[in-house]
Amino acid sequence: MKTFTVDEAQLLLPVLESLLKRAIEAKSSASLIEEELQNLSQEIFFSGGAMVDVAAVARKRASLRSALQQAQEAVQEIGSIGVQVKDLDAGLLDFPFQFGEDTVLLCWKMGEPRIAHWHTLDSGFQGRQPLDERFLKGRLDRPN
């Protein structure tokens, strides 16, 4: 597993934020298209059948597949860098950080100006704690 220093992770934020936004927008677009297709299915069901523009439906389905693929590719690109997407809807990313003999996760949420939190592998977002001088100076004391 790749690990990052705080500075390395911070330097990656502009690129990661762009990828994350692309994934979120594509997922949102896919959700809207999916809703449109579901509404059309319900309309057909409740009307006992309806004339359907098959070509338009095919284009919507192709758009849905494209949006889902764009979201997946952006998330995979983030993962290929070594960063973990923990919650796409919230824009939550984790960066593995070697802390002495332990690995912890530097935690960043879209909208935050910088990486300022960490948590253990087990505690997740709810266990976030502020970074302190041990992280910033690279000391090898274990976090509490």
Image (cartoon, rainbow, N blue to C red):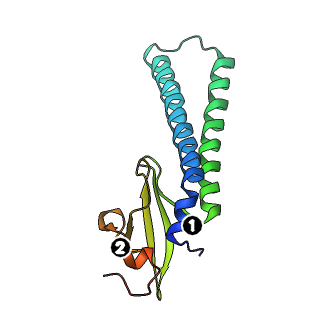
Q: Is residue 25 left or right of residue 131?
A: right
Dot 1: what SS? helix
* Residue 16 locus on image (x, y percent): 57, 53
* Residue denoted by label 2: 132
- Amino acid type at mark 2: Asp
In the rendered image, residue 100, in percent from the top left (x then y), is placed at 46, 87
The quarter of the picture where the C terminus appears is bottom left
Whole-percent x, y for residue 9 in the image:
54, 64
Instruction: State which quadrant residue 59 falls in.
Output: top right
Bin the neighbour count of mark 2 within 10 Å (Cα to Cα): few under 14, some 14-19, many 20 and up: few
Residue on which the image places disc 1:
8
Whether residue 140 is situated above or below residue 133 in the rendered picture: below
For the point 43% across and 46% down, which residue is it?
Answer: 89
Labelled pair 1, 2 in contact (Cβ < 8 Å)? no
The one nearer the camera, 10 or 143, is 10
Tag of residue 76: none
- For the residue pair 71 and 82, the one nearer the viewer reads as 82
Q: Give the vertical position of 144 relative to 83 (above or below).
A: below
The correct choice, above or below, for 125 with respect to 42 in the image is: below
- Residue farthest top in this picture: 51
Amino acid type of the residue that numbered disc 1 sits on in the rendered structure: Glu
